[in-house]
Image: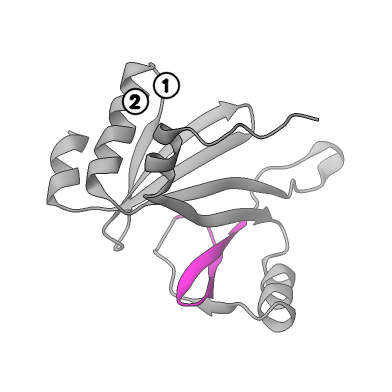
Amino acid sequence: MRRARQNVPHEQSVTAHMKLDHATIVTSDLESARSFLCDIVGLINGPRPPFQVDGYWLYANGRPVIHLVESTVRAPEGRTASRIDHVALRVEDATEWIALLGRMRLNKVPYQLAEVPLADELQLFVSLAPGVVVEFVTQLGNSISTIVN
């Protein structure tokens, strides 16, 4: 078993401006998943941007912490592939967002940027390995929109 690394000053400064934002669950049975997470777990079905695939955003304490997305990919034997698709880290600080982009570029880490429809947010997706995605999300503001281009 690997041991956790000791805190390093650089890591402390980065994580001070970052928190877990949400997990995305892809499923072929949206209604059962929504029912379980709302009726049993206690999350609240709330507003969701108009993405091109069906789904729900489920809220806790006013934040969308679980994103349910309809699976459109078929698994072997004709079954629909359900999975936890990605985790997202929210970067609140514009300076840290710019620094994160700088570290991505410096280390030649490929990434994709996308704006969330009607939410004034910017997403940055990194594929760590096949099927393993980390998303970073931030509020899209003047200081950030000038960096994107």
Identify the residue shown where x is 24% and y is 53%. 140
Question: Looking at the image, is mark 1 or mark 2 nearer the viewer?
Answer: 2
Give the total number of marks visible in the rendering.
2
Does the magenta run of residues contain 69? Answer: yes
Amino acid type shown at disc 1: Val
Q: For label 2, count other residues whose C-alpha is less than 10 Å away and answer few (under 14), some (14-19) or many (20+).
A: few
Which residue corresponds to the image point at 25% horizontal and 37% vertical from the top-left? 98
Q: Residue at x 40, y 63 (%)?
A: 50
* Residue 37 or residue 29, whichever sits in front: 37
* Residue 19 within the segment the image draws in magenta: no
Query: Label 2 sits on what residue type?
Result: Arg
Return the x and y of residue 97 as percentages of the image width and height.
Answer: 29, 41
Q: Are marks 1 and 2 in contact (CB under 8 Å)?
A: yes
Q: Position of residue 129 (x, y in %)?
A: 61, 26
Vertical position of residue 51 compared to residue 45: above or below: above
Along the viewing direction, whichever of 127 and 70 lies nearer the viewer? 127
Q: Which residue is mark 2?
A: 103
Q: Residue at x 32, y 21 (%)?
A: 105
Left or right of 15 on screen, residue 121: left
Quick one: 68 or 3, which is closer to the camera?
A: 3
Residue 106: quarter of image: top left
To which residue does mark 1 refer? 109
x and y, in percent, of residue 145 in the image = 17, 44
From this view, report whether residue 7 is shown above or below residue 20.
above
Along the horizontal axis of the image, is 144 left or right of 60? left
Segment tinted magenta in the rendering: 52-70
Prevalent SS, magenta region: strand
